[in-house]
């Protein structure tokens, strides 16, 4: 079998790429020929298909003309279409699996594959096909206005940072993709949470949306009994991620236990200058350094204030046997069993977060008990082995016959997926 994997980055840039590389490694190790399609970048891993990659694109710099040209290329990238067509004609894959293709590659590449009889799978790492700003949030509240495909609300509410120009660009992108039918050409959407499944099923038929949680490699992550007495945050320091809420909760706590902030982003300088008491900004961690930071933490906090899908930070913490304190939003409540594997709190509520942290940081036995429960849950429900088996079932369903996707309807075990 040959599988073409399409993702704008071919390096570990976030959760979407973590999933991509997990699946890529599994496919390669199982004898599947993997064909890469991405954007040129100096951080990319080596690929024999790099000659077919698209030029690196930046959308927030350059002259006004360059910005207009870039905005148009958000909708349709002639370069991506041409280079993907050449790659498919040269390699003849059995299917194309898309991950994060927005902006630099654009959903227009879906039509290229379909025109050549190649079935297409798209993993929904965020709600971009049904929310032009991809967060499903409107003024800090869950928003459902655009779910059915009526995107004018993004203009009415200036959803992109309050900017009419940015909102208009995203509106045009969404309308154009709807007109082009890019998402309608996708055979199967993979939804990594019930939240995502229910969100996109407002626009796309339920039989095209297959539920499949992200996986974590519990076989190679030992549960850790180490506990060095600090709270850990792993993620970008950007609006919507909730790092400031965490730091305010820490500042107000009766006892000042250490907190480690692993990540970088546009808010880093502001947060570093504002919060200095017993806080260590460790920068971006990955690989062994990230695993060590999680393994030695007391508690992992995921304080996101927008709709996370199936965050790897939660799954990795559970695999290491750490209690998780996270927000009650998006797909997170499906992962964290409140008061069993950790605590849930309302987004932005620093007082509630502080209460949970004080409870856990003052009770090592409870931390160990919750962490062990989280580890068991990760082994049972979120193992990478389970994820990969379900992924292969999706692939096989599309390859059995031209009408195989029709058999993913109501009552089929695949359509019911791993959420049952």
Image (cartoon, rainbow, N blue to C red):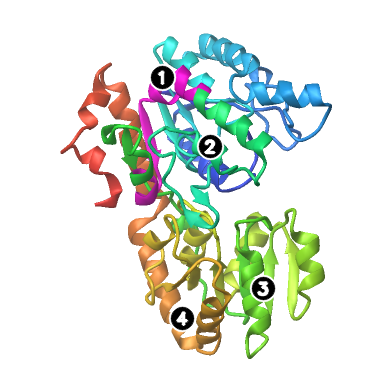
Q: Classify 10 Å Cα crowding around label 2: few (below 14), some (14-19), many (20 and above).
A: many
Q: Secondary structure at mark 3?
A: helix
Say whether residue 62 is left or right of residue 405: right
Q: Earlier in the sequence, mark 2 or mark 3?
A: 2
Q: CA distance from mark 2 to mark 1?
A: 30 Å
**Of the pair 267 and 125, the residue shown nearer to us:** 267
Which residue in the protein does label 1 denote?
94
Ranked by sequence position, the earlier of labels 2 and 1 is 1
Instruction: Give the SS element for disc 4.
Output: helix
* Secondary structure beneath label 2: loop
Q: Residue at x 75, y 27 (%)?
A: 67
Region rendered in magenta: 176-197
In the rendered image, the vertical position of residue 226 relative to residue 178, given as above or below:
below
Mark sitting earlier along the chain (2/4): 2
Q: Which residue is mark 2?
A: 132
User: x, y (%) of residue 114?
Assistant: 42, 15
Depth check, front residue: 176 or 9 = 176
Q: Can you see residue 225?
A: yes
Within 10 Å of disc 3 (Cα), the crowding (few <14, some 14-19, many 20+) is many
Q: What is the crowding at mark 4: few (fewer than 14 residues within 10 Å), some, or many (at least 20)?
A: many
Does 237 sit left or right of 376 as displayed?
A: right
Report, in whole angstroms, how far the alpha carbon at label 4 lies from the one at label 1. 46 Å
Query: Which residue in the protein does label 3 denote?
Result: 247
Indicate which disc, 4 or 1, sits on the residue closer to the N terminus: 1
Question: Dot 1 surroundings within 10 Å: few (below 14), some, or many (20 or more)?
Answer: some
Between 326 and 20, the one nearer to me in the picture: 326
Separation of marks 3 and 1 at Cα, in angstroms: 48 Å
Magenta includes 35?
no
Q: Which residue is mark 4?
A: 368
The reply to whether the C-beta atoms of the residues labelled 4 and 3 are less than 8 Å apart is: no
Note whether residue 292 is visible: no
């Amino acid at each position: 079998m040959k599988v073409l994997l399409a993702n704008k980055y071919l390096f570990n840039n976030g959760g979407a790429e973590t999933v991509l590389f997990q699946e890529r490694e599994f496919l390669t190790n199982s004898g599947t020929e993997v064909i890469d399609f991405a954007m040129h970048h100096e951080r990319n891993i080596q690929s024999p298909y790099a000659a077919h990659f698209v030029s690196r694109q930046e959308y927030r710099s350059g002259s006004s003309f360059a910005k207009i040209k870039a905005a148009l290329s958000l909708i349709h990238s002639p370069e991506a279409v041409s280079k993907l067509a050449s790659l498919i004609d040269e390699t003849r894959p059995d299917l194309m699996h898309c991950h994060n293709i927005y902006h630099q590659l654009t959903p227009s590449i879906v039509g290229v594959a379909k025109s050549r009889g190649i079935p297409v799978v798209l993993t929904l790492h965020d709600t971009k096909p049904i929310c032009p700003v991809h967060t499903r949030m409107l003024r800090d509240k869950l928003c459902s206005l655009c779910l059915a495909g009526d995107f004018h609300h993004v203009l009415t509410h200036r959803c992109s940072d309050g900017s009419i120009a940015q909102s208009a660009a995203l509106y045009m992108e969404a309308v154009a993709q709807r007109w082009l039918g890019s998402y309608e050409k996708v055979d199967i959407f993979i939804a990594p949470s019930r939240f995502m499944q229910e969100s996109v099923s407002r626009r796309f038929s339920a039989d095209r949306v297959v539920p499949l949680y992200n996986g974590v490699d519990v076989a190679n992550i030992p549960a850790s009994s180490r506990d060095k007495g600090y709270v850990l945050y792993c993620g970008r320091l950007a609006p919507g991620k909730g790092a400031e809420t965490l730091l305010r909760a820490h500042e107000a706590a009766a006892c000042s236990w250490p907190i480690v902030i692993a990540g970088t982003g546009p808010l880093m300088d502001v947060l570093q200058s504002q919060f200095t008491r017993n806080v260590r900004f460790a920068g971006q961690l990955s690989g062994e350094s990230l695993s060590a930071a999680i393994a030695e933490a007391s508690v992992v906090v995921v304080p996101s204030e927008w709709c996370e899908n199936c965050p790897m930070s939660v799954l990795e913490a559970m695999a290491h046997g750490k209690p998780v304190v996270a927000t009650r939003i998006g797909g997170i409540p499906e992962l964290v069993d409140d008061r069993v594997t950790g605590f849930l709190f309302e987004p932005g509520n620093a007082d509630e977060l502080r209460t949970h942290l004080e409870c856990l940081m003052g009770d090592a036995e409870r931390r160990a008990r919750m962490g062990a429960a989280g580890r068991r849950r990760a082994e049972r429900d979120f193992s990478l082995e389970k994820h990969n088996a379900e992924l292969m079932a999706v692939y096989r369903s599309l390859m059995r016959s031209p009408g195989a996707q029709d058999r993913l309807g109501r009552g089929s075990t695949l359509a019911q997926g791993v959420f049952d």
